[in-house]
Structures are given as structure tokens and as C-alpha cells.
Amino acid sequence: MPGRQLLMTFPLTVGSHTLAEYRARGGYTTLEHALQQRTPQEITQAVTAAGLQGRGGAMFPTGRKWAVVVPGDGQPHYLVANADEGEPGTFKDRWILEHAPHLLLEGMLLSAYALEARHCFIYIRGEFDLPYRRVAAAVEEAYAAGWLGKPIGDSGFACDIVVYRGAGAYVAGEASGLLSSLEGKKSYPRNRPPRLTVRGLYQRPTVVNNVESLSNVAGIVAHGAAAFRAVGTDKSPGTRLISVSGHIERPGVYEVELGYPWRRFIDEDCGGVLGDRPLKAVIPGGISSQVLTAREVETLHLSHEELWSAGSTLGTGGMIVIAEGTCMVHLLQIMLRFYHHESCGQCTPCREGTGWMHRIINRIVAGEGRPEDIERLYYIAKYNDGTTICGLGDAAGYAVSAMLDKFRDEFEFSIAHKRSRYEGHIE
Amino acid sequence: MTELVINGKPVQARADQTVLEVALASGFYVPTFCWHPQLSTAGNCRMCLVEVEGRGLDIACNMPVSAGMHVLTDSEDVKAHRKAMLQFITLNHPVDCGICDKAGECRLQDYHYTYNGERSKSGDPKLRSHKLVNLSDRILLDNERCILCLRCTRFTHEISKSMALGVERRGDASAICAAADRSLALDPYSDNLIDLCPVGALQSREFLYKARVWYLQPTASICPGCARGCTVQIWHRKADWQLKALDARQNSCIVRVTPLENPAVNGPWICNKGRDLARIFERRRAEQAMLKGTPVALDAAVDAARALIQGARHPAALISNWASNEELAAFKRHLGGRFTARVKRDCEPQPGEPLQDDLLIRADKNPNTAGAQALFGDGPPTLPAATDLVLIWGEGCDFAALPHGAPVIYLNSYLQPENGHADVFLPLSVQTERRGHYTNFAGTVSEFQPCFRKSDSVADAEALFEALALPAAVSA
């Protein structure tokens, strides 16, 4: 087990996702106590003190996000759980939605209490079938049990949760794109300022948090900020759910204590690289994080600060393990096809740049690469960085420039010899 | 007030302004495609990227001012990024300026020459998309030229509220499309999209391939289509570029009409009726003076009219509310003492024409009712029973309703059956042939300029009234 566990604390059984079993594990007692004994400010303070960082990929401190919402400012506040998990390689929120939906709901209720939000939304990826059914069933159970819809006990706090299914757009996972979609529009991300915590859903202060971030709230409130900080490292407290895929013996979702040695996680917890091949590279947190070579991975620990200093990020926790013998040119083609397909088309650099890069890489893979193509890819990546409305364009650029930086010889080989050094293998 | 520094120059700004607004107001040009002062901020073209010292690049159109910020609108980094944005924008733009009506007044063209000037960095084929899409019987859409600034969709959502346009698909396959259940044909303001489009993606079907804009010149004028009195620019061929081979009428026709921005009256918009001024002014003109339908020289007809006026004991006049303030004043000055004058309505709303809305269109379909009523009162256009001479000025008069037996002097610009029934018919010039002012429904006075020379066989109303009054002045 990769370190201590905060979320995966119960055995998975046929009924472990139900309200009855969640109650039997002590579920909703934190909420009951908090509503009686804690003020909303105390909950925000606990989350701030715990140093919880957003688990959706940007690692923005959750407490700082919440602090922007002014209590009692006379307008409705909204809380939205971002369950539109769409980053390639990432399927960790799915574990919570399938196996611990009530943990999410309790976290949302506590957060809604802290933020004075009367209405909450769960925006769930449309392709998620079982997770949707589990969450929808959990919300129904919670309504029937009186946790939702009417005042809980004598606290006067009541909250409604609406589950909304997305229709399959990657940018709808970006917080402002998500809100546009939730409002019934095309999921175009919005320009900042204003921040969403100032003007978000229906132009009201809105907090959009990742499912995993919200699922950590109940634990923080129950055991205190210090207990949360005791897990993980100083600068990245707590654990991360990491979904491992690619060339790995035991793919799946793991809860990793932050600061856990990376190589040990791959070799021991995940059973090593598939077929005992040597490790070539790892994409640490969804394809939008910069790829790291086996040599870089060797000494690193899985913590936010160490990955940042290595020029990458733990991102969404979607780890893709790449074994020796994989064609990085082909891999980049697959990644760029995704960005091209998912660019919403709103702002210029990303709309044109993702397609441009995709067409260039298609040519290289087809053996029609030109010597200037690598410089061109760098150029497109450079002018997507920081010039777009949301992070999609930047992310595509990061992915490309990291690939080119670290595996430039493979691209040059493909262009010069009009074929892949590894015959295009990606399996 | 907030003080910030743009390119080293300290400038004052209101706290609610954006850096773009402040920069433009203080004389620093920042290129934009999607930004428009009357529309919401989309921030999608990314052309207005500016550098804030210590904070890097961001778009100026969505950047609130903050005290002491140092903005650079022309740093090396900004220039490099502008170049790159133009590379992106032209990546799939066909660059078919040679056959594009927008050429010569196209922002993309201007910016390319000003800020980029380089060949495309891509050697790959451009993406194809739908061309010559009929959005309505007035507007054509070319999705290849479209740079997706979304000015048009925002206009139909925020200004005209027809909700007729949207975007389908995503990424570089995004395309402007007509909404399934709404039609741009029902939008009386749709032609503003043609001016609004910063490139040649939305084209006027009326103007399509009619002229290159650099052969045209605009003349400030006023749309006479309703009491709003929107200021417009009437585009006609430049004097230096007259066509010699074709029909001479090509040289003195209205080629197109665009709004003349005027915050006091119409802002930057006009309605579709204002685009079709040619349908008003280029109807078949009356250019021949007549006595009871018999053609005579203009001078002879004026003499006859003068004789009728001198002989009348109770002359009455129906005043045109299409006349300029100058003409109305001339009538008042020269003939006002002799005539009982009533203001008539020259034009009534046509069937199917939008009557009135909250944006511009007014129910009174005449340009100068306010100006005419200011001089001649707002009484009904009925004449005293004792009337023994009627002077009718302008269209829209029912001859059958006139006092029986009274001779008629008729002043009109267009060929109409009534012209021949009048005892004296005097052809008049039209608005595009003279200078003048109209007073709109709210009392705002605007000016129009002459675009074309009037024919010698038609009279100018101002001079005509003076001529009609002359002998009376002599005998007195």
C-alpha cells in the first residue's frame, strides 16, 4: 500500500457504496456534529489550515478559493462538484463516484454549509454510466433520508444537489466551461477576470471543486487540519488518488500518500512495468502534464513540489507508464489528435494551433515530415502558452514541447528516415 | 480616477474602464477583431494582447485598470505575439482578397500589413468549409473567411435579439450557422452584420461584386426611412474613378449605404431599410414640368404657378414632411403669409414593414415630421372649404379628397399618375442632390450632404419658393 490512506479506508463489497453501509462506517456523523457545533467559518478555516490543494490538476489551495466567497453578501452562492473527469489517462474520480458517492455528498454538504450555498450541482461526465447511476442513486437515498432538500435537524441548513450529465466535451471539465455548459450553453470557457468565485454560475459567486477535493473535506472536518497535515509532505499534505494505466502490470486507482517514492510505487505497488520491460518514460498526471523520462522518475517522490521542480506536475493524477520500445512520435500523434478534437474553437491560438500541430504530426507519422516541422511545433506551442482563454492550448503546448525536448532524436529520426525508429509501436 | 502608465505616458482612467478602452482613448492603438464597444467582451481573437510589466501578457479588452500598472502596447514580446496570432488566424483563411468585397476595408488585411507581413509558416493545405451560404436573401456567409470572432452571434443575441446565428461544431471545424428555428430574414437589423464582420465572411448580396470599395467615396447623409433619422454614409463612385464605358447612370447611383456612427441618434447601427435607400431615391424620377399633363419648360411652369398663386384668394398648402428644415423655412419665409399650411404625411408604413421597436425603428415613416410641425403646427391635413388653390408638396396625397374645383400646383420628385392631373406640375430634386437638415422625433437635428448633381430640368424647392413669391414682392 503506497503510504497511509484517507479515502480508500473500507473494503469494496457489493453494497459498500450505499447509504446504509456508509452510515455504518460512521458516515454523515461529521455533518451532524458540524451543523450543531461548528460555524461555517470554522469549516473554511479547517480546510484552509489543512492546506488542501485542488485535486483537479491545478493544485489551487481550496481554502483560498473558498475565502473569496463573502458570507452573507445577499446573493446566492453555488457549489459545483466537477465530476467531468476527461483528462486522458485519468479515472480516479470515477472510483469515488462509484464506490464512495456518499463521501462526496457529505463533503459537498459540509462545503455548502461553509459557503452558504443553498444549491449544489454535480456535473458528471456524460460517458460515465455506472458512476452516474451510483451518484444519482446516492442523491436519491440522501433525499429520502433527509440529508438533502429540507433543513437538517434543527440547524436550519438545507441544501439541494442536482446531478447534471455532460454531453462529452473535454473543455467542459474546465471550471468556467463547465459552468457555461451547466447554464445550457456551449461549453466555452470564460475569460478571467472576473473569477468564478466572484461571478460564476448564473453570474453568482460559485465554487467549483474537484470530486476528490470535496471528498477530503469530511475527513478534514472530522479529524482536524493537523491530522490531515500529518499525512503527506509539508508542501503537499494528504494523499492523491492516482489512476495508473499504460505499460504496467497492475493498472488501476491507487491512493498514494504524497511524498511516496515514485519508482517504488511503480515497481512494488503497481507490480512493475508490463512484461518486465525497462521503463522509458512516465506521463505523471494526465497527458497535459509534461512527460518525464525514466531517469528523471528514478529519484523523484510523488509530491507536488518535487514534480514542479522537475518541470512537470502531478496534474490530474492520471499516470501513464511508458515502456521502452514505445514510439513517442506515434504517442504524440494520439495526444494531438485528442487536443485537436477537443479544442472548443473559441480562441484563436488553440483553435488553429491544435489542428496545425495535429496535421504536422500526422505528416511526420506518415513519413512526410519536413526538417522545419520540429521548429514549427515549438513555435505553435510557444504561442499557445499564456495566450489562450483556458488551459487547453497551453497544455497541448506543454505536452508537445516536453516530448520534443526529451525525445527529439526520435522525431528527427522519423523525419529523416520517413519511418519510426520503433515501427510505430505503442502497445 | 486611477492613474496608470501606458508606454511610459501617465494616463488617467475611470476604475471601471478596461486597459483597451484607456489605451484607445489616450491615443495608443491596439488591434482588435472580436472587441466592439457595443457588444459584450468575448476576448477570443487574442489580438489585443498587451504586456503588463511584471505580469506578462494578457488581453487588454478584458483587463481592468489598476493603479500604477505599467502597460506596454508595443513591446517586442507583444509584437511577436501579434505576429503569431495573425499566423494562426490566416492559417485557414483563404486569403482570397482579390475576389473579396471586404478587401480595402478589411481588418485582417490591414493588420497583416501593419503587424505581420510575413508568409504563412504553414505549407499544409488549408481547411475547406462552406462558402456562399445563404443566411437570408440579404446576407451570404463564407465560413472559410470567417475568423470566428463571434461579433455576429453576439450582435444577434445582444443587439438585434433575433438569436438567428450560432456556432456549430468545435475546434477548427467551428462554423457560424443559422439557428434552426430562427431566421435572419426576420431580423430587420441583419445588414449590420456585414459592417460588423471584421473580414469578408458576411457579405451583402446586394453589394456582392458590385464595386471595389476604393473606387467609392462616402457622403454623410440621413436615412429618411423613419422619424429616427439615422445618420448614414451613402457610397457612390469617386469623381476620379468615373466609369466611361458603361451607362452613365452607374456613376451617379447609390452603390451601398452604411451607418455613420452617431451616439446621439443611432449609435453604430442602422436598420435594413436604411441599406435600401436606392429603392427610395432611385425610383423613376419626374424630370419634366407639366401643365395639365402637357410637358412645358420649367420656367413656363413656374410662371403659370406664380400666376395661379397671385390670382387665388384663399390658397392652401399641404407641406411635405420629407422636406429639409431649410426648404420648410424658405416656404415659410416666402409663401407662409399667403398660404394656409398643413403638414401632411408623405409616407405610411408599408405592409410587412416593422412598425416600431426598442432599438431604432419608429412608427412614423417620414424623416422630418418634427421639423415641419415646428413651423406649420401639428393640425390634421384637412383644408378649409373656401380654399381656391391647393399647393401640394411631396408624395402621399389623395387628389380625390381635395376641395372640389380648386386648381392644384403639385411639387414632386417621382413619376406618379397624379403628376399629370395637376394644373401645374413642378419636378423637385431629391435628398441626395442637395444639402440640408432634418429634425428627428426627439428633436435632434442632423445634416445631409449632396452626393450627386441635380438635373437642370428639376427645381430646388428653396429657390423655387423664392421664385414663386417674387412678383408679389415686386407689386408690394
Image (spheres, coloured by chain):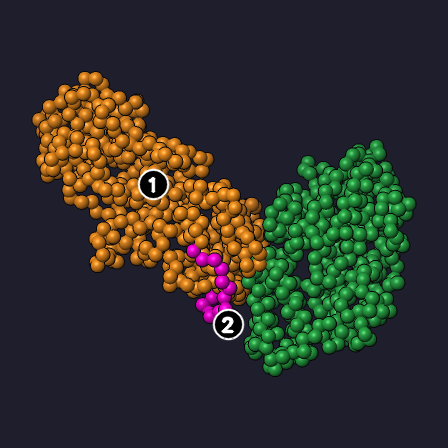
Chain colours: A green, B orange
A180 in relation to A258, above or below: above
Q: Residue at x 51, y 70 (%)?
A: B124
Looking at the rendered structure, the kind of residue marked 1 is Cys
Provide residue A169's location: percent of width, then percent of height: 64, 55
Asked which secondary structure carries label 2, the reply is loop
Q: Residue at x 41, y 63 (%)?
A: B96
Provide residue B95's location: percent of width, then percent of height: 44, 64
Query: Crowding at label 2, few (<14), some or many (≥20) Cα neighbours within 10 Å?
Result: few
Q: Residue at x 63, y 44 (%)?
A: A183
Magenta-drawn stretch, dominant element (helix, strand or loop): loop
Query: Crowding at label 1, few (<14), some or many (≥20) Cα neighbours within 10 Å?
Result: many
Looking at the rendered structure, the kind of residue marked 2 is Gly
Q: Residue at x 18, y 17 (%)?
A: B386
On-image quarter of the C terminus of chain B? top left
**Pick the front one: B336 or A23:** A23
Q: Which residue is mark 1?
A: B223
Provide the chain ID for the residue under circle 1. B
The answer to if B121 sits in the magenta stretch is yes
A308 in relation to A156, above or below: below
Asked which secondary structure carries label 1, the reply is loop
Q: Which residues are magenta?
A: B116-132
Provide residue A388's location: percent of width, then percent of height: 59, 59
Q: Which residue is mark 2?
A: B123
The answer to if A310 sits in the magenta stretch is no
